[in-house]
Image (tube, helix red, strand yellow):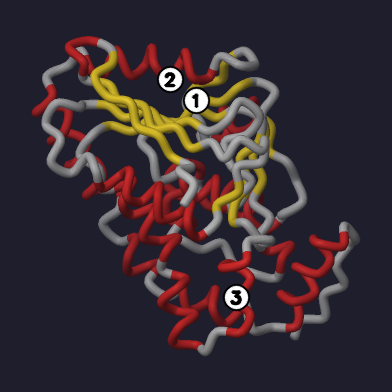
Amino acid sequence: MVDYVTIEKGLGPEGRIAVVRFDRGDGINALSPEALRQLTDAARSFEDDSETSVVVLTGGAKSFSAGFDLKDAEGRSRQTMDMGTLRRHLKLGPRLTRAWQDMEQVTIGAIEGFCVGGGVALAVALDFRVMARDAHIRVPEIALGMNMSWQSVPRMLHLMGPARTKQAVILADDRISAEEAYEWGLVEQVTDPGKSYDAAMALAAKVAAQPPISVAMTKLTVNRLAHALDDLASHMDLDQFALASLTEDHKEGVAAFLGRRKPRFKGR
């Protein structure tokens, strides 16, 4: 089994910074089911870590992540799964984003190149996002005949408000530039190309210099208040995703993507 995720601890002030690097080495960094599992395990590995205050999550030099891997054999097997098996398999995504959101440590994403679909879902589950000036964000799920899942819509709503969230999700073919993402509140800092990791580490150092227990308790308080109704608002998004995956429009969206052509949706 190939390791897509590496973890380095003991960095920065008092060794309180850790770096999680997700890099498949192909410049695309798609989220296969195995990659989802490894990233979830990486987040959970910090549960009993009292020595780490901040975790920086970074992708490859050319991409944070291209989103779910539509060409992965395990991922494509969803097409033939019965509904019960499909629902269980679809829990991989929300399990990942929940694991990162619930971490006691402050989390910072360093985004280079592009951040697409599931990559966006992961990024908005973090506490802060730093983005290179030449990078872009895109949410293509609707263009593939699906809904934005992994409980991401409430998280995006908290960051951007309803109109911008609708714009980002519904206008699926539109790229969101780093400057637009900053203006909308989707990212907290924009850097020169190739410098997002350095900027994320500088921010991490500032956080790591603060009292660890107070920082952890403050993050927990803010998250509990901000996300108090998220489960109520998005508890059906997994089932909506499963339902959408059975539509003709979804099959057409994926076929068009793989065939590099414009989809022809019929609303069925």
**Residue 170: x %, y % from top left:** 67, 58
Name which residue type carries label 3: Ser
Dot 3 falls on a residue whose secondary structure is helix
Of the pair 24 and 262, the residue shown nearer to us:
24
Asked whether the residues under the numbered discs 1 and 3 touch, taking CB atoms below 8 Å apart as contact, a structural biologist would say no
| Residues under numbered marks 1 and 2 in contact, where contact means CB atoms less than 8 Å apart | yes
The residue at 30%/13% (across/down) is 205
Give the labeled residue for mark 3.
Answer: 77
In space, the residues marked 1 and 2 are separated at their CA atoms by 6 Å
Amino acid type of the residue tagged 1 in the rendering: Val
**Label 3, label 2: how far apart the Cα atoms are:** 37 Å
Between the residue at mark 1 and the residue at mark 3, the CA separation in whole angstroms equals: 35 Å
The answer to whether residue 131 is visible is: yes
Mark 1, residue position = 130
Q: Check disc 2 and report the residue beneath it.
A: 200
The mark that comes first in sequence, 3 or 2, is 3
Residue 51 as seen in the image, left or right of residue 3: left
The reply to whether residue 163 is visible in this rendering is no
Q: Point out the frontmost of discs 1 and 3.
A: 3
